[in-house]
Each structure stands twice: as C-alpha cells, then as structure tokens.
Amino acid sequence: MREKRVVLWILATVLVLCALVLPNEARAATTQGLHYSVEDGEVTITGCDNSVSGEVVIPKTIEGYPVTTIGAWAFMQRIHITQIKLPNSVKTIEEHAFALCYNLTKVSISASVTEIQGHPFQGCTKLTTVTVAAKNTAYSADAQGVLFNKKKTKLIAAPGALEGSYSLPGTVKTIGNSAFSSCTKLTSVRLPDALKTIEAEAFKGCTMAKLTIPAGVTKIASDAFADCQSLKKIVVNKDNKVYSSDSSGVLFNKSKTVLINAPGGLSGSYILPHTVEVIGAAAFSGCSGLTKLTVCNAVRRIEYAAFDDSGITKLDYLGTMAQWDAIDIDALNERLTHWIMVYTGKSPVKVTAEPADRHAVAGNTARFSVKASGNGLTYQWQYRPSLSEDWKNASATGNKRATVSIPVTLSRSGYQYRCRLTDRDGNVLYSAVVKLSVLGIQTQPADQYLLTGKTAKFAVKAQGTGLKYQWQYRPSTTEGWKNASATGNRTATLQVPVTASRNGFQYRCVITDQYGSVIYSDTVTLNVVTLKITAQPVSRTAAEGRTVSFAVKAQGTGLKYQWQYRTSPKGAWKTALAEGNTTAALKVPVTATRNGFQYRCVITDQYGNVIICAAVTLKVK
C-alpha cells in the first residue's frame, strides 16, 4: 500500500513538472480564427482564417499568456478585414504583418508597441488612418494617419489611401523602405529641408507628377522611384552636393557620371549627357512611354535590370560596335538584344599612349600626359581624392591640354587622375586612371635641450610608400654627415644618450620610399643644458607664531619654482600655497599643526627639464 502511494506521488510530481515546462515550449494553436504560437510564456499571432472579417480586436491574452507579437505576414491578403485594434500587450509588429489587406481602413497601435519592422501595411490601398496611442514612447502618427518614429525624424509608412498633396513634417530626416509604395492616389509630396535619406522603394508605384529633392539629401536608393509611371520630373536643388538632375528630370550623381533614375513618366526619346559612365540599376525601369535612347560612348557599365519594363525599342550609340561590346553589362538586361541598334561613331577617339602613375616629392611638380588620335580633340583632365568620391575637373596648369602639371602636396597623395577626350563629333573617351603617390614630411624633428644623463628623442613623421629611415649626425656644421648608430637609427625615432661631449651635435633623417625618391628632414641640434641646485634649503625649528623661510639656489635658464609640502615622510606631496610658493624662497607661518611638515622645491627650466631639491622639515617648539 505504501509503495502504491509512492508511485502515485511520483506521477503527480511529473505531471506538475510537465505543466511547468510546457508553457515555455513553442507550440501552435488556433482561437477565434486567429492562428498563434506560444513560446516562453508569450503569444505570437502567426495568421488568421480567411473567414475573419470586419473589425478585428486582437485579445490581450490567450490561454492566460500575453499577446506580445504580430508575426510577419500574419494578416496577408485577408481581404475581408476592415479594422484592426491591438491590445496594450503587443510589443512587436513584424514585417508585412498586414500586407495586402485590401479592405483594411484603420489600424490602432497601442502604447506598448516598441518595434515595427519594415512596412507593415504595404499594399493596403484603402487604409486611411493609422493611429498611435499618445503614451507610446517609440512611435507617433500625424493627422493624415502617417506613421513615424516618436520624434518624427523617420517616416515609416503612409496609409495607402493617402491622396492629393502631402507635406512631410520639417523634422523628417529619413523616408523609410516602401514608405509611400501603396499610395496610388498621391499627386504631390513636399520634402523638408532636413531630409537626408530616401530608402529603397520609398515611392514605388506612386502617381506623383513631380518631386523636388532638397539640398541636404545625401542618400537615395537606386529604386526609390521605381514604377512611378506618372512621375514626370525629379528636380534636385542646385545646392545639393551629392545629386543633380537635367532638364528632362532625370536623377544623377553630382558630376553626372552616374545616371541613377529616370522618372517613370519620361516618354518619347532621351539623350544621355556625354558625361555618363554608368547607367544604374533599374535606372529606366517602368518608363513605358520611352521608345528611343541615345547613349554616349563614355558609358562603361550598365547595371542590372536597367531597362526593366521600359518601352525602349531603339538605341542610338554614339560610338562603334567594338566600343559597345566593351561595355560591362549586368544581368537582367537581355531585352537589349531585341532592340534596334544604330552605331553612329564616325571618328572614334583612340588613346595611343596612356598616362602613368607618378611618385613625387612634396614641393615638386607631377606631370601626367596622354596621347590620342581623333578629329578635333579637346582635353579635360579630372581628379578625385578617393574611389568613393566623384570626378571633378582639374584647374591645374595644362588641365585642357595633353599634359597637366600638378603641384605636389601631401594632401594630394592618393589622388587619382584621368583625361576626358572629346572629338568634334561629340565622341568621348577616358584615359586610364592613374595615381599620384607623394613622399613628404608631415612633422619635422625639433631641437632638444636636455641635461646630461637623459635621452634625447628626435622624431620625424613622414608620408609615403615603403618608407625606410636612416638618421645621420655631425659634431658641427663644418664636418661631414655620418650614419648614426644609436637606438632607433633606422626608425622614425632616434634615441641619443645625452653627454657633455655631444653638446651642439646636429641630426637629420634621410627618408627613402620604395620608388627610390629621397627626402631629408630638417637639421636639428642637441643642446646640453645646465640645471643644478647650488644651495639646498635647510630644516627649520621655530616657535609657534613665527614665520620661517626655506630658500633654494639653482643654476639654469628661465627657471620656474614650485614649492610643495607633505604632512609626514610617507604622505603625498601637495602644492604649497604659502607666500613665495612660486619663488626661490618660501615663507611658512609656524603653527602647531605644521609640526613635522616637510617641504621641497620643484625647479623647471624653460626647456621643461626638472630637478627637485632636498626635502626639509619644519619643527615647532
């Protein structure tokens, strides 16, 4: 009987343990048409039956567990739902949670939501309003139902039914992914001066007629305006330092070497500027009314899907077939093979001698030269400080001739140069890109004024490639230079023991780069100076109420004094504040509390050398 009770107790214990463990295990279920999963004591709504319709109120708890997450794609294409209310238990709305709910008109976001991923309402074309609880600390919405982060610096999603004109708040710096992608009735948008970034597909499919990019925008995704077939022009503020546009409303980088995006409403025929080298990804995507394109022979690359869903059937190429074949064309541009191609290059430009890299010393002049054949050639040398920056026209001597002369400065090290060649027919060709490497000294060594027994450190900081150092010395200006053998003689820092015999020795560093160019640092001198104490202070014994004087005598140049004290032989030294604390003589009022105090003077010369006198003691009678 006892054994039976034990067995029953064990079974009961196991059942209790299972009950405690199971809620923390992931499991799926359905209630009231809502599909959900429970994990770690929290509920995620993962989907719903297609029969769910009208107003949907998400429960605060299911099975006693809080509903904290609306899962990715949970309500996708549930076309009978018109409204959704979230409980104040929900913390996260995952990406595309309510995507393509065509009849959804209103969404209420509770105060508890702290994370909204991506565009949760994409494709909800009848959505008129998104409201956010006033106490929500992460998100907010405006009167038009547009969703923002709390401070309204990022626009997250506009409701699909937004129509007419819309002006963004002046605080917005970022327009998020697909933010306006469902707004098929939007006719115009005014962007604020504070705007910096327009993310991927931000205006995809919008029906605006015109969009003006403010001066401060520094980042625009290549597909930000994809499939905007009503968009006639993208106009960039002339003061924008990153982007530009032409008279047809096509978007470029500032120097117009990269064509980023053509407005979907561009129609008829279009001629690329002669400066364009790259046609960007999806650049003409959705330009269904565009039938003919004229491409300059400066183009070197066509990125993926550049002409997807465009109406282009004919291309005039201002170059030869061989030049066209040399263009790097990415995938998803197969439709090019079905176009009528016309090669109009009658007098192609040809480079017969490319410019070469230059390795020069700061202060000299570097010359880049190109030789080319063609009719009526004109030259324009260009430069860029780094690979990530746009090409700019050079203004140096010879910038419009076959040879350009560049003043060599340390700041130009690493600059790249090329020549843009144009013939009388408008054919354009660029020379090879070459680089300027500069050898120069950024920081010169300095004269040293030190005491014997110290170590003088002469340091130089140079710029160049594969640098080698050799320090040299000479005892006087009348003697020849010799290679130094002291520590660091073949590094950027030479360490010389200071001895009286080296007083007046001069030093310099010979620096050689991997190309054989040589520069010399400034010549500097080691000066052995004198700083010594000629009379030490002495301890004093005096009665309370008197004043004692501690005096020191020293020899050196530009001496400065600072007296210190400590309350006991093992105490820490502190700056004295008594009369004469920064002179050679300190005057200390004698008090009982100062009995046993010790004093010393720290003496510094004008070169920063320091000596400290002997510590003396005050005894109070």
Image (tube, helix red, strand yellow):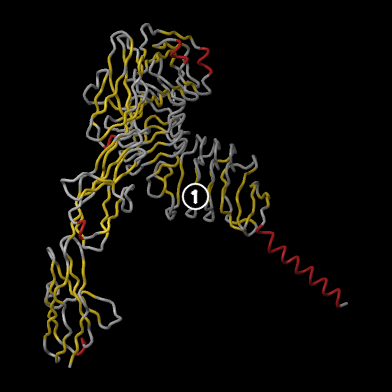
Image point (43%, 44%), residue name: 147
Above or below 307: residue 190:
below
Please name whichever residue, 360 or 60, is drawn nearer the observer in this view of the structure. Answer: 360
Q: Of the residues shown, which amino acid type is indicated by label 1?
A: Glu
Q: Position of residue 486 (x, y in %)?
A: 31, 53
The C terminus sits in image quarter: bottom left
Above or below 276: residue 217:
below
Image point (63%, 55%), residue name: 39
Image point (20%, 60%), residue name: 500
Mark 1 falls on what kind of element?
strand
Please name whichever residue, 292 or 480, is drawn nearer the observer in this view of the structure. Answer: 480
The N terminus sits in image quarter: bottom right
- Residue that carries the numbered disc 1 in the rendered image: 115
Please name whichever residue, 544 or 551, is drawn nearer the observer in this view of the structure. Answer: 551
Q: Position of residue 304 (x, y in %)?
A: 49, 25
Could you tell whether 257 is left or right of 4 in the image? Answer: left
Q: Position of residue 382 (x, y in %)?
A: 30, 25
Residue 169, by quadrant, is top left
- Disc 1 crowd, CA 10 A, few/some/many (<14, 14-19, 20+): some
Q: Position of residue 564 (x, y in %)?
A: 21, 75
Q: Residue furthest top?
A: 346
Q: Residue furthest front?
A: 479
Q: Residue furthest right?
A: 1
Residue 19, by quadrant, is bottom right
Could you tell whether 321 is left or right of 594 in the image? Answer: right
